[in-house]
């Protein structure tokens, strides 16, 4: 089995274009070259036009049988290799266990320090829980890291606009691409997604040629319309969200707000939710709210009859803040050591999506962009991953794995007409479990302790993670079959 993965070249007899395994170095090179996504309309769907199809790269030179991306003369020199764990700055901090948060991504490397990753797994979770993938999918991802894979789990805010979501995901991933490329070199990038994350991986591989994937694993794939995915969306959800978003359901709207002339507006329902989340985040971190936040709350929530009497510019004396921090710091440190702070903080990330979705519906969102039929049309013509594993669970009413398998086999036909020499493989497997199976597992260290006490099979049965464990085994088996 290979322990490192340089790009492998395959050259046809009729063209000088080589086929390069998509790697993290490709992201690094793209970032240095300053390429921008160019969109065009295709059947009402925004499509990216820059980049080659199916991982085809023309700017490569071959040395000893390995393809190496051609260096751009204008690109800056690469710095000395450094461990991303040691990188400092406000955008790098430690999370749960061995996880590190870097530039909006959660990164977990293989446990052996000197172990070269077999591949980089770029993971996207499902709707809502995808905002905290290192918590929601902790067991599955930590087991994959234990098998020698470098994990990058990118959180995202659920939105009706899938294109904007994909663009944000790619932007976050590319912010850490230079560091990962310096540290690990040309490691193949494998996309893994669950539920909505599987759909987003398909869209990224279809619509964004500058974001290559050596392979994709799609778990519990579904691409339903809003009305199919959310029961009573038009009848119940939409009216409630519109009321909340337009402030129709706030009975204290006319009573609150510190400005009788209307220059300072009272908080609407979304404002109250967001204020509650901000205050909760300060409480989780053990910090007093800033003077600016306290003043904003005071100005917008002070009853109008009292606005001229009560002060609304709040300034907490510095000695009060210092005294508070001296008292609370020991508790903060113990909470941080126990992993409680990142756990609670990311739980708020999940809740923070709710006001965003309310606002989208209030502003007129009624279906996803692109809609299901446009996704199907685009993937049939432009899906470029040469290996795809589709994982279906036998008790999942939301699953559309059979449909996406059919779609990708049609994409294979289209691809072979364009590139006859390119291998293209789609495999679907059916496992026991339901839609939430990849999430139903304790942290890996807890599972290991339970197995030591109860035995492996008993622990998996009682803690309900047999399905998650089998999912990891099948993904690893499939990756090994593809020399990843």
Image (tube, rainbow, N blue to C red):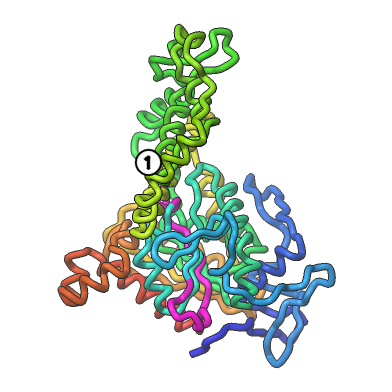
Looking at the image, which is closer to me, 234 or 152?
152
Query: Which portion, as a residue range, is magenta?
Result: 109-131
Looking at the image, which is closer to me, 190 or 391?
190
Instruction: Please name the residue shown 47% across and 59% down the image.
Output: 124
**Residue identified by numbered label 1:** 230
Q: Circle 1 — which element?
A: loop
Is residue 461 found inside the magenta-colored segment of the image? Answer: no
Please state the horizontal and vertical placement of residue 229, each as a whole percent of the image. 39, 44
Instruction: Please name the residue shown 44% across and 59% down the image.
Output: 95
Instruction: Please name the residue shown 37% across and 63% down the image.
Output: 138
Please state the horizontal and vertical placement of residue 409, each as a whole percent of the image. 51, 68
**Image vertical order of residue 113 relative to residue 297, above or below:** below
Mark 1 neighbour density, 10 Å: few (under 14) some (14–19) many (20 or more): few
Residue 104, quarter of picture: bottom right
Please state the horizontal and vertical placement of residue 285, each as a whole percent of the image. 42, 46
Q: Along the horizontal axis of the image, is 57 left or right of 376?
A: right
**Image vertical order of residue 352 relative to residue 12, above or below:** above
Residue 461, quarter of picture: bottom left
Is residue 119 found inside the magenta-colored segment of the image? Answer: yes
Please state the horizontal and vertical placement of residue 368, each as a whole percent of the image. 51, 43
| Residue furthest right in the image | 73
Q: What's the magenta bit mostly, secondary-structure-wise?
A: loop
């Amino acid at each position: 089995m290979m322990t490192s993965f340089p790009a492998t070249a395959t050259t046809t007899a009729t063209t000088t274009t080589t086929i390069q395994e998509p790697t993290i170095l490709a992201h690094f090179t793209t970032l240095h070259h300053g390429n921008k996504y160019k969109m065009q309309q295709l059947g009402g769907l925004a499509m990216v036009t820059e980049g080659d199809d199916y991982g085809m790269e023309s700017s490569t030179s071959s040395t000893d049988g390995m393809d190496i991306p051609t260096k751009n003369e204008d690109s800056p020199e690469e710095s000395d290799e450094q461990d991303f764990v040691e990188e400092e700055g406000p955008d790098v901090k430690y999370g749960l266990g061995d996880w590190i948060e870097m530039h909006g991504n959660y990164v977990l490397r293989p446990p052996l320090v000197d172990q070269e990753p077999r591949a980089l797994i770029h993971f996207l979770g499902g709707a809502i829980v995808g905002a905290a993938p290192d918590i929601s999918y902790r067991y599955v991802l930590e087991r994959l890291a234990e098998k020698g894979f470098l994990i990058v789990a990118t959180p995202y805010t659920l939105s009706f606009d899938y294109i904007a979501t994909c663009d944000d995901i790619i932007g976050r991933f590319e912010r850490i691409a230079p560091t990962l490329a310096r540290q690990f070199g040309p490691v193949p990038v494998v996309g893994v997604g669950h539920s909505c994350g599987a759909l987003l991986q398909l869209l990224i591989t279809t619509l964004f040629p500058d974001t290559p994937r050596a392979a994709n694993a799609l778990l519990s794939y579904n691409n339903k319309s809003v009305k199919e995915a959310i029961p009573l969306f038009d009848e119940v959800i939409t009216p409630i969200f519109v009321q909340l978003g337009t402030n129709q359901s706030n009975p204290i709207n006319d009573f609150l707000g510190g400005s009788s002339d209307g220059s300072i507006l009272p908080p609407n329902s979304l404002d109250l939710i967001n204020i509650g989340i901000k205050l909760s985040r300060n409480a989780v971190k053990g910090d007093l709210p800033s003077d600016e936040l306290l003043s904003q709350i005071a100005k917008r929530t002070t009853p109008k009859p009292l606005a001229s009497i009560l002060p609304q510019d709040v300034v907490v004396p510095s000695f009060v803040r210092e005294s508070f921090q001296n008292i609370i710091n020991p508790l903060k440190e113990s909470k941080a050591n126990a992993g409680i702070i990142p756990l609670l903080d990311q739980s708020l990330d999940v809740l923070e999506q709710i006001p965003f979705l309310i606002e989208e519906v209030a502003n007129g969102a009624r279906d996803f962009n692109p809609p299901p039929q446009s996704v199907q049309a685009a993937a049939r013509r432009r899906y470029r991953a040469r290996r795809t594993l589709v994982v279906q669970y036998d008790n999942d009413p939301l699953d559309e794995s059979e449909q996406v398998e059919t779609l990708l086999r049609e994409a294979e036909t289209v691809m072979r007409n364009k590139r006859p020499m390119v291998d293209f493989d789609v495999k679907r497997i059916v496992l026991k479990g339901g839609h939430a199976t990849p999430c139903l597992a304790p942290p890996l260290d807890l599972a290991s302790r339970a197995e030591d006490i109860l035995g492996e099979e008993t622990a998996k049965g009682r803690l309900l993670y047999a399905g998650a464990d089998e999912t990891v085994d099948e993904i690893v088996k499939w990756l090994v079959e593809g020399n990843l």
